Amino acid sequence: MVTLLEVLGFLTIAASAVMFLRRRARRGSVFAMIVAGICVAATLPSATMATEYRKGDTVEVAKDETIKGDIFMTGNHVKVEGTVDGDVYVFCKNADIEGHVTGDVIAFAQILRINGQVDGNLRGFTNTSLISGTIAKNVLSFAESITVDSTGKIGGSVTTFVNTL
């Protein structure tokens, strides 16, 4: 599906081309070029990403499962053991990230455990955060306590508003 922004951008480019070519070519050839450009733009595939929503008492991404795009997960216990090619949004009591997340993890949880690999940032609004895995970029956390184990790695900066680090 073509968005309004894409249509407006295309119309701007087409209007600029018409103004430029108005004096240099016959009217018929300019019109033919505009129609050909519209046909080419209409046949190009648009980039899309899926967003998935999961909710329940216990919500999980299985170990052999791969999610293409972002995922929103709500429930009492959330567990990510598989691969997510996008961002993970978690709203729960207990969250376990044991798989591979290629994007960011945004967590609103009482207890957050990161045992897997996060290629992006961690943004946590938690009571307790336990980091035993790898976070490739930055950590921003509003928490009562954050624990980074000896196996935990953070590739960027750590910005926290915590009682115990």
Image (spheres, rainbow, N blue to C red):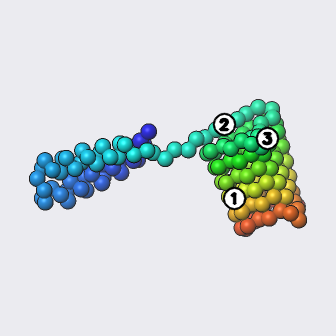
Question: Label 3's element?
Answer: strand
Q: Is residue 12 visible?
A: yes
**Placement of 159 over or under 39, stated as above or below:** below
Residue 131: give x, y in percent of width and height: 83, 58
Residue placed furthest toward the front: 64
**In the rendered image, which quarter contains the C terminus?**
bottom right
Taking depth in this image into account, of 86 and 163 the one nearest to the observer is: 86
Q: Earlier in the sequence, mark 2 or mark 1?
A: 2
Residue 118: give x, y in percent of width and height: 73, 56
Q: Earlier in the sequence, mark 3 or mark 2?
A: 2
State the CA–CA distance, disc 2 to disc 1. Answer: 21 Å
Residue topped by disc 1: 119
The amino acid type, in three-letter code, at marker 3 is: Val
Q: On the image, which quarter does residue 54 sit in? A: top right
**In the rendered image, which quarter contains the N terminus?**
top left
Question: Label 2's element?
Answer: strand
**46 sits to left or right of 153:** left
Label 1 CA crowd tier, 10 Å (few <14, some 14–19, many 20+): many
Are the residues tagged 3 and 1 within 8 Å (C-beta)?
no
Residue topped by disc 2: 53
Q: Which residue is drawn at 75% across and 56% down?
A: 117
Number of numbered discs on residues: 3
Q: Nearer the viewer, mark 3 or mark 1?
A: 1
State the CA–CA distance, disc 3 to disc 1. Answer: 19 Å
Are the residues tagged 2 and 1 within 8 Å (C-beta)?
no
Q: Residue at x 68, y 58 (%)?
A: 120
The amino acid type, in three-letter code, at marker 2 is: Tyr
Residue 20: give x, y in percent of width and height: 20, 59
Q: Which of marks 2 and 1 is in front?
A: 1
Q: Is residue 92 visible?
A: no
The amino acid type, in three-letter code, at marker 1 is: Asp
Q: Which mark is residue 78?
A: 3
